[in-house]
């Protein structure tokens, strides 16, 4: 039995008339009931990449960590298991995801170990030198002004703090039909150039192949990257 494609599973789960263009819009900024459904399916498709990036981050006790673009917030529990006494913050510019993530993480928010914000990461609502680590997963495709985003991330990182970018490489993204609608795709060198231009010091790129998925009858294993850079001391 063949596995249904990611796109077909998304479309059948949500509604038959969902087009690649509409799906791309929802992936960029989920809204309404449709956005909630897309968020749930993205948990499934992003789970492998989250684990890959979390492994790369080598999280230590008592660190302050920021996620940009947390979606419905279903991966924070996994992050808290990585070390003790973490303080985690997040920002997402989808009001639907912000509200859902609050509901999904009520206990952590009440315990003051999780701080979720609604807003655009072009202007981060955090003080200078606040975080040991910042990460984002499948988010940078949607940044219209990477300079502004990266300079803000640089500002809120502590000196020596690290930024982890989880993405699927350009050739893998091109095989997904919704990416022609508003996605800016990167390979390793493209993103490395963006980082260096914005005052980061490039460290390394880790790569992996995800489990095979199918589009238009063809199976392929997306190549995923975790690009690591730091704010110089």
Image: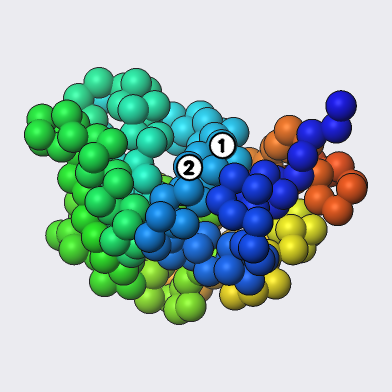
Q: Are marks 1 and 2 in contact (CB under 8 Å)?
A: yes
Picture quarter with the C terminus: bottom left
x and y percent of residue 21 in the render? Answer: 63, 71
Identify which residue is drawn at 65% across, 48% down: 12
Foreground residue, 18 or 115? Answer: 18
Foreground residue, 82 or 139? Answer: 139
User: What residue is shown with label 1?
Assistant: 44
Mark 1 and mark 2: span between their CA atoms?
7 Å
Q: Is residue 170 visible?
A: no
User: What residue is shown with label 2?
Assistant: 40
Binning the other alpha carbons within 10 Å of mark 2 as few (below 14), some (14 to 19) or many (20 upward) gives: some
Identify which residue is drawn at 89% across, 47% down: 218
Foreground residue, 206 or 116? Answer: 116
> In this picture, is 14 found above or below 43?
below
Binning the other alpha carbons within 10 Å of mark 1 as few (below 14), some (14 to 19) or many (20 upward) gives: few
x and y percent of residue 191 in the render? Answer: 59, 63
> In this picture, is 68 found above or below 220?
below
Picture quarter with the N terminus: top right
x and y percent of residue 199 in the render? Answer: 42, 68
Left-right relation of 144 to 233 = right
Q: Residue 122: which numbered mark, if any?
A: none
> In this picture, is 203 found above or below 82?
below
Foreground: disc 1 or disc 2:
2
Q: Quadrant of residue 17?
A: bottom right
Residue at the limit of the structure toward the right, as seen here: 218
Secondary structure at badge 1 equals helix
Identify which residue is drawn at 28% across, 36% down: 104
Left-right relation of 39 to 1 = left
């Amino acid at each position: 039995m063949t596995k249904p494609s990611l796109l077909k599973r998304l479309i059948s789960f949500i509604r038959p008339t969902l087009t690649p263009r509409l799906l791309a819009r929802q992936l960029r900024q989920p809204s309404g009931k449709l956005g909630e459904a897309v968020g749930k399916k993205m948990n499934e498709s992003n789970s492998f990449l989250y684990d890959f990036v979390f492994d790369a981050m080598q999280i230590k006790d008592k660190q302050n960590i920021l996620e940009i673009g947390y979606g419905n917030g279903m991966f924070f529990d996994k992050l808290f298991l990585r070390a003790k006494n973490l303080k985690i913050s997040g920002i997402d510019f989808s009001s639907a995801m912000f509200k859902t993530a609050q509901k999904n993480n009520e206990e952590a928010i009440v315990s003051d170990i999780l701080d979720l914000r609604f807003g655009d990461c072009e202007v981060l609502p955090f003080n200078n030198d606040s975080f040991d680590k910042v990460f984002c997963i499948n988010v940078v495709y949607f940044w219209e002004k990477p300079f502004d985003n990266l300079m803000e991330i640089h500002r809120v990182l502590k000196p020596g703090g690290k930024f982890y970018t989880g993405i699927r490489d350009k050739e893998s993204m091109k095989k997904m039909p919704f990416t022609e609608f508003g996605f800016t795709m990167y390979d390793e060198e493209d993103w490395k150039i963006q980082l260096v231009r914005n005052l980061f010091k490039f460290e390394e790129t880790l790569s992996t192949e995800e489990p095979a998925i199918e589009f238009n009858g063809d199976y392929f294993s997306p190549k995923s990257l975790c690009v690591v850079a730091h704010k110089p001391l």
